[in-house]
Image (spheres, rainbow, N blue to C red):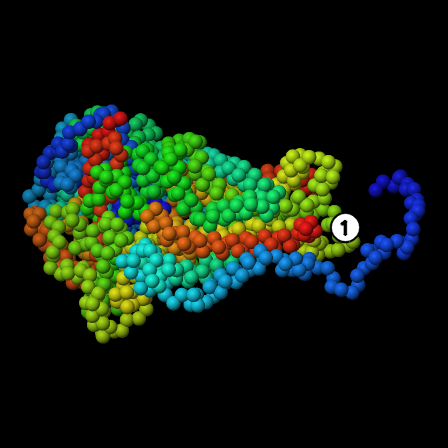
Amino acid sequence: MPSNITRPDQQHYVAPVEETPLVAIDTVKAEGKPSNLWTDAWNDVRKRPMFWISSALIVLVVVIALFPGLFTQVPPNNDCQLANSNGGPTDGHPLGFTKQGCDIYSRIIHGTSTSLSVGIIVTVLVFVLGIVFGAFAGFYGGWLDSVLSRLGDIFFSIPYILAAVVIMSVFSQYANVWVISLAIGIFAWPATARVLRAEILRVKNSDFVMASTALGVSQFRILVRHVLPNSIAPVIVITTISLASAIVAEATLSFLGVGLPSSTMSWGNDISAAQTDLRTAPQVLILPSIALSITVLSFIMLGEVIRDALDPKARAQR
Amino acid sequence: MKIKRFGVAAIALAAAGALTLSGCTSGDASPSAGAGDSSAVITTNGNEPQNPLIPTNTNEVGGAKILNSIFAGLVYYDAEGNPVNDLAESIETDDAQTYTIKIKPDQTFTNGEPVNAQSFVDAWNYGALLSNEQLSSYFFESIEGFSYDEDSELTGLEVVDDTTFTVKLKQPESDFPLRLGYTAYLPLPESAFEDMAAFGENPVGNGPYMLDGEGAWKHNEKIDLVVNPDYDGGRKAQNGGLDIIFYATQEAAYADLQGGNLDVLDAIPDGALSTYEDEFPDRSVNQAAAIFQSFTIPARLPHFDGEEGKLRRAAISKAINREEITDVIFAGTRTPAHDFTSPVIAGYSEDIPGSEVLDFDADEAKELWAQADAIAPWDGTFQIAYNADGGHQAWVDAVANQLKNNLGIDASGAPYPTFAEARTAITDRTIQTAFRTGWQADYPALFNFLGPIYGTGAGSNDGDYSNPEVDQLLDEGLAETDLDAANAKFQQVQEILFQDLPAIPLWYATVNGAWGETVENVEYGWDSVPLYHQVTKSE
Amino acid sequence: MAGYIVRRLLQAIPVLLGTTFLIYFMVFAMPGDPIVALFGDKTPPPQVIEQLRERYHLDQPFIVQYFIFLGNIFRGDLGTSFSGQPVSEILAATFPVTLRLALLAIFFEMVAGISVGLISGLRKGGIFDASALVVSLILISLPIFVIAFVAQYIFGIQLGWFRTTVGSGAPTQDLILPALVLATISFAQITRLTRASVIDTDTQDFVRTAASKGLPRTRIVPVHILRNSLIPVVTYLAVDFGVLMVGATVTEGIFNVPGVGRTLYQAIIRGEGPTVVSFVTVMVLIYLVVNLLVDLLYAVLDPRIRYAK
């Protein structure tokens, strides 16, 4: 600040603070729980029906994934008879049969665990890597930004099909959920990182960040407590949708011949296998797609509720 | 997406068009054109050639389709697979070992160079030379002088005069003339040897068509061919040219036929197999092809050797309901196998003694399996390996399910992500499961389905099958100069194969194709490629 | 500013080295011998395999192969494909096609995604918002090949509005249908992202200030809300552009687009190292430039963001 400017003395013409009603407002509430972003969010979220509906659906899907035997007694992969190929519903087989003559309902139930796992593992992978890389790059800037962002560029430039072919081939002996999730996720996180970085670039110039800096709060603390929560909204949007993309990507990889082996039950595998008969027996493809949609919808709804709850401004508005 | 790379249809290479048998009719096979505009250009599907357009370096359908249109070899095949002389006037032999080949006089390449005996001898020598690294060099391995170990001239080839040359083989092989229509045996003009790379980009041939000028090959898009006015063999073009459009997927090609952007199609995507004949009534084919499909169980796998192995192989064969799979999975576009060859080959027979082992019988299968278990109890999973990029998953899963249901064992497919990986594992013998095998004939002869696959140490004997009796019969058959006598020997070979089942025969592929409203006279050759020269189109 | 741009461009060098190394390693690590695969289902004699391996340097250790490739690049030689075509020619033929396709797709998803997202965000919880969610959900839970086949069947074959596949020379009007199909992949992302961002911005102080100043909504929405909501959207579009440039394998296959995705996929499957690496190298360059442009665009969209340091 230029030193040649002199400030006039500020005169107080107002009543002493003690005599105004403002004192009640300004008093620090020492007793009572401290206000906290997460508890506030929880208090907000639990009042919303959307939260309970989506949570219930997610719990149901998780239970199906963990205990498929509770929902069907029909083994999904045994006793597949070609005579039933693409057949409609019959007694004990409420959704009909696949091209190979396997029970569709049973396959959807038993495929839940694979598809859900792929979705969740990929999402967590992308979320964690994306946040670490994006947050540090955007917040600290400078050479750290250069290194992290360029690293992201390298990963991002690698065609995911090449990655998938290589990873699935190298680990073909263990072609399982973890390997395919790695193949899908390891090259997808730079998108999340870049979006978060952009958002942080914007947020870190906000007044409340400067205020925190002025108060002497450590940089890392500012990042975690103030900048990140205020930048996370678009990441949550991308992440919840990427859950769907991951499950679908598994189908696309099957379609290209680098997916999970057909003995592994998964929605993606079934969707891909049903593709050839899309015009003659569309239900075989549509049924697992519906299961996928319901799962994705519940996660998107939950993400929406959480995003809303975490955004203090949106909350204040209500 | 069925990338038609090396998948089923492309199975074994090119099997390009032509072929021969000594002194067959000289050709005039084209049906006369109906109502057709002789200047109309036919569009058809193809694949980007994987190699430069050099006859001895082309071993897949994409390149072979083009080469066989722009070159004329010694012979070609008509729709029934009968060899017809194209450039050859006669192919004669007394002992099945030395052949005298006479070609028609006054033939020219489209650049004006003469086609003479030297054109063949030089081209074959080029293709055989080790350091030229030609993919089809093994087609010359039976000619005297051939070597895999060093550069060496084909001393068995001798130019007698401008239109005559002789071929001496290392041993008698009566089906040699049958091979001569394969792409590798095409002639080359002298100018080709000056710069083979440039030639491979703009090949100059002598066939019914020629490239539409320099740069007619638009990579990854299409190649435009126009009629060669100087060609006067039996394949004279009845249309104004041929545009071969390269498709990455069969689905795209089929969609173009439906959308009216394509005239003739020779591949139907899986998704349309059950509907294409209704969509194109009277304008589609589903006819037998020279493609045999099977899976091979190497004897080195545990439980598959000796008496136990024989019982298990027979049990597996009998546990597969081929009829049901070809109907349901392939919508009738495969025919259950009755032997190890193909119905389009002369000498084919449906009831060779022992072929009952291909008939579905779940009870007997179980019984045989139990007998094998008495020798040594079975454990583990029976797996069939396949390349996942070739559209094999559906049938492998179906076979695995039938084995599960009918034998009560655990069975599954074992996918390899890429064709290269699957082939490498098979070639270096690291594969520890049964694996998918298939054979598309290079030339229409029984021997071609047997010798290269089941002869001891033969090039494509991926299961390392070895039976001295089979070797003996194969040699005897080859030495026979009489076709029927030779085929009798080969059928004896098959009787033994039915006992040993080195490969489990599954079905024969068929040619599946369809064409648009404006074209007529569409016929498909024995090698599944349409006979383009006789197609007519009205506009 | 100029200094910043120069620095960013210099960073391309290590990125290029890193990427080519990684890619080359991946192609090398792919199991399976590409030479064996050249022979289809037939087994070639070992001597022939040896010869061909030597020609493509496949008999050398990985690191030697990589440096041979790198050395050739510095001499401007990108190598040739198995079909004998110079890789540089393949690049020149395919990239312009895919570029047009990607730009079209980005255009579609930008127009559709941003406008739907904007309306959803402004009328949060309304019927439009809910229907937009359902539509984007359907699109996202269907694999791209299903959408492509259905679109091709309905609009290409049944209605005849578009050519079923892309014709010779890939004219732009033929690219519209595949571009629309590609746009559906990211439509959901763009819509949701715009919506979230708009909701966020709508509650910012400067929007309230603008409203209290008496500015009409028709001015607040485009100038204050939309502009300030675009940063995550623009970032994502840039990312998506990268994906589209290289990842349109399935769509390019179904519509027979002679572009990067299809060619690259074939090269990957066939193990053609030089082709794959060259493609990806060009990809990286494009990607770096796009990211740089986007970073510069941030400063335009939000004046508080500065790179002057």
Identify the image quadrant of the C terminus of chain C. top right
Image label count:
1
Residue A141 image offset from top left, x and y in percent: 66, 47
Q: Does residue B398 appear in the picture of this structure? A: no
Q: Residue at x 82, y 55 (%)?
A: A25
Residue in front for this viewpoint, A212 or A233? A233
- Residue B223 is left or right of residue A21, and the answer is left
Task: Name the foreground residue: B297 vs B203.
Answer: B297
Left or right position of C25 against B419:
right
Residue name at image x 21 percent, y 38 percent: B282
Give the vertical position of A130 relative to C72 (above or below). below
Work out whether residue A228 or residue B446 is closer to the camera in this orientation and state it.
Answer: A228
State the image coordinates of residue A231 (x, y, percent, origin top left).
64, 50
Instruction: Report the residue marked by disc 1.
Output: A211
Question: How dense is the environment of label 1, judged by Cα within 10 Å: few (below 14), some, or many (20 and up)?
Answer: few
In terms of depth relative to the viewer, which is nearer, C183 or A1? C183
In the visual, does C283 lie left or right of B486? right
Q: Quadrant of residue B168?
A: top left
* Letter of the chain that mark 1 sits on in the rendering: A
- The x, y position of residue B338, in whole percent, is 16, 55
Q: Is residue A181 left or right of residue C217?
A: left
Q: Amino acid at mark 1?
A: Ala
Q: Mark 1 falls on what kind of element?
A: helix
Q: Residue at x 39, y 49 (%)?
A: A256
User: Residue B413, position in %: x, y?
Assistant: 33, 59
Task: Using the rendered image of the protein, determine whether residue B380 is visible from the camera's viewpoint.
Answer: yes
Residue B245's place in the image compared with A105, above or below, is above
Q: Residue furthest bottom?
A: B374
Which residue sits at x=24%, y=53%? B326
